Amino acid sequence: MKPVHILIMVIVFAGSVFAYNYVYQSAIDEALHAPITPSEVNTEKHRPDFTMTDVDGLPRQVSEWDGKPLVINFWASWCEPCRREIPDFIDVQRQFQNDGLQLLGIALEERQTVRDYMDGMAIPFNYPILVGTDEAVEVARSYGNDMGILPFTVAIDRHGNIIQLQYGEFRRKDIDVLMKKLLDAPSSRQ
């Protein structure tokens, strides 16, 4: 076989691999950024209970925030999409805290790693951060993240019902749509 034929085959093969990966990655990105609602995954259920420690080592129960719209964001400091979301979540907490919204971060890491990351941030967190490794993975799984995707965000209404899951990065425009849905929901069952 002539070298030019080998070169053509390599170029065709490389182009095919690139095209396949591009199409495949685009499909994954689209799926990860599309919010998943309870009707799509049958998650309209009451949120699971859990207790974890915060970055100061104090035990916190999710029931502390009963009666409030709650957004739980599972993240890690090594996760680039997680780090991109955090400023938006800080802004959303600041913007909607007087409307009763509560954000809760759950870092899937050791406490000191999370503390070091938080200390190095230009903008301080304004919502509680819980930490854990295996236990955080179990909590994420109990909330519907069987795939171990980070970031992973769960929206819970005032009644404690899971109303939306978000696998992958939550874009600001989608966060704003969620805030409207969470904050406009009636405060008592009809």
Image (spheres, rainbow, N blue to C red):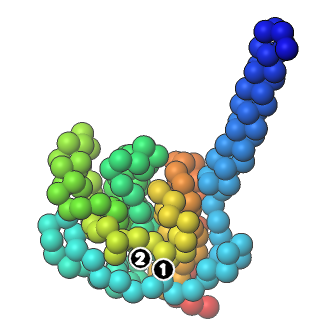
Horizontal side of 30 relative to 120 (left or right) equals: right
Location of residue 171 with respect to 74 vertically, above or below: above
Determine if residue 187 is in view.
no
Q: Position of residue 171 (x, y in %)?
A: 54, 48
- Identify which residue, 27 or 14, lies in the foreground: 14
Q: Quadrant of the N terminus?
A: top right
- Identify which amino acid the numbered label 1 is placed on: Ser
Location of residue 45 with respect to 92 vertically, above or below: below
Q: Position of residue 55 (x, y in %)?
A: 19, 64
- Identify which residue, 12 or 20, lies in the foreground: 12
Q: Quadrant of the C terminus?
A: bottom right
CB under 8 Å between callouts 2 and 1? yes
Q: Residue at x 45, y 85 (%)?
A: 48
- Identify which residue, 135 or 179, lies in the foreground: 135
- Identify which amino acid the numbered label 2 is placed on: Val
> Few, some or many C-alpha atoms within 10 Å of disc 1 (few <14, some 14-19, many ≥20)?
some
Q: Residue at x 32, y 67 (%)?
A: 133
Q: Position of residue 130 (x, y in %)?
A: 28, 68
Residue hosting label 1: 142
Q: Residue at x 18, y 49 (%)?
A: 116
Per the model, the C-alpha gap separating discs 2 and 1 is 5 Å
Horizontal side of 154 relative to 50 (left or right) equals: right
Number of residue marks = 2
Q: Secondary structure at mark 2?
A: helix
Residue hosting label 2: 139
Q: Quadrant of residue 168?
A: bottom right
Residue furthest bottom as drawn: 190
Horizontal side of 66 relative to 57 (left or right) equals: right
> Few, some or many C-alpha atoms within 10 Å of disc 2 (few <14, some 14-19, many ≥20)?
some
Location of residue 74 with respect to 14 vertically, above or below: below
Q: Secondary structure at mark 1?
A: helix
Q: Residue at x 34, y 62 (%)?
A: 108
